[in-house]
Image (spheres, rainbow, N blue to C red):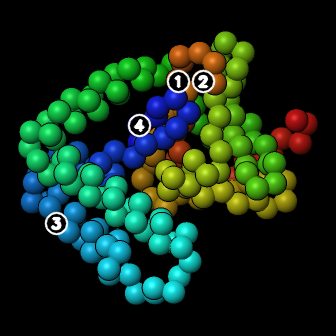
């Protein structure tokens, strides 16, 4: 995932579910599989809500854009260079673990934060974590974070005010206390 301001963007490789060193045949195979799953004409339940149709169409368009970019060797080389530049620009000031974060529950959204040395905070909420494959659930005064992947993952979080960024390391399933003093 690439962080831009306070938003997270999946790379074209993540959209297609391939590694960045995948060969053209692997990319083509992943594209064909994904496009069949999300093609609007292939959807079984036409009576589903329009919101579901919109999500399917957006996913279909994401897959199509990813294929157009990394399915072409020339555009893929340009895209890879752009990714490298973005990653170099995202200099990490430190690595933090989930245990270092403060948890706030505001009802619909659970927000995790970490103080920056400038006085502001690094934030990530339950919706942004869901985009990374992690889900959060509340159990009394504890919050459980469950990862969909067996491997550790990380997310780069930008500060709300300055240019510093931290890397949040997510290692498997975790339980964190909710801060009731905020």
Query: Which residue in the protein does label 4 denote?
Result: 2
State if disc 3 and disc 4 touch (CB < 8 Å): no
Label 3 to label 2: alpha-carbon separation? 38 Å
Tell me which label, 4 or 1, sits earlier in the chain.
Answer: 4
Q: Is residue 80 at all visible to an observer of this figure? A: yes
Q: Residues within 10 Å of mark 1 (few under 14, many from 20)?
A: many
Query: Which residue in the protein does label 1 denote?
Result: 165
Tell me which label, 4 or 3, sits earlier in the chain.
Answer: 4
Query: Which residue in the protein does label 3 denote?
Result: 29
Depth check: give the residue in front, 107 or 179: 107
Label 4 to label 3: alpha-carbon separation? 24 Å
State if disc 2 and disc 3 touch (CB < 8 Å): no
Front tag of 1 and 3 = 3
Residue depicted at 26% across the width and 58% down the height: 64
- Would you say 182 lies left or right of 52 here? right
Residue depicted at 16% across the width and 66% down the height: 29
Label 2 to label 4: alpha-carbon separation? 15 Å
Label 4 to label 1: alpha-carbon separation? 12 Å
- Would you say 156 lies left or right of 177 here? left
Label 3: element kind:
helix
Residue depicted at 83% across the width and 41% down the height: 179
Q: On the rendered image, what quadrant is the N terminus found in?
A: top left
Residue 95 horizontal/vertical position (percent): 52, 28
Depth check: give the residue in front, 2 or 56: 56
Q: Residues within 10 Å of mark 4 (few under 14, many from 20)?
A: some
Label 1: element kind:
strand
User: In the rendering, which numbered label is found on residue 159?
Assistant: 2
Q: On the rendered image, what quadrant is the C terminus found in?
A: top right
Q: Is residue 173 at all visible to an observer of this figure? A: no
């Amino acid at each position: 995932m690439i962080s831009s301001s306070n938003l997270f963007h999946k790379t074209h490789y993540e959209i297609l579910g391939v590694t960045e060193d995948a060969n053209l045949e692997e990319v083509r195979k992943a594209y064909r599989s994904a496009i069949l799953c999300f093609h609007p004409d292939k959807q079984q339940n036409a009576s589903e809500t329009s919101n579901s149709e919109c999500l399917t169409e957006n996913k279909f368009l994401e897959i199509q854009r990813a294929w157009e970019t990394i399915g072409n060797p020339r555009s893929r080389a340009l895209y890879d260079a752009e990714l490298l530049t973005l990653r170099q620009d995202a200099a990490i000031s430190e690595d933090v673990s989930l245990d270092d974060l403060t948890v706030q529950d505001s009802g619909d959204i659970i927000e995790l934060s970490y103080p920056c040395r400038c006085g502001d905070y690094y934030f990530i909420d339950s919706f942004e974590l869901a985009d990374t494959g992690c889900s959060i659930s509340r159990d009394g005064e504890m919050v459980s974070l469950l990862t969909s992947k067996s491997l550790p993952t990380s997310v780069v979080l930008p500060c709300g005010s300055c240019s510093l960024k931290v890397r949040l390391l997510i290692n498997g399933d975790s339980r964190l206390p909710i801060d009731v003093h905020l």
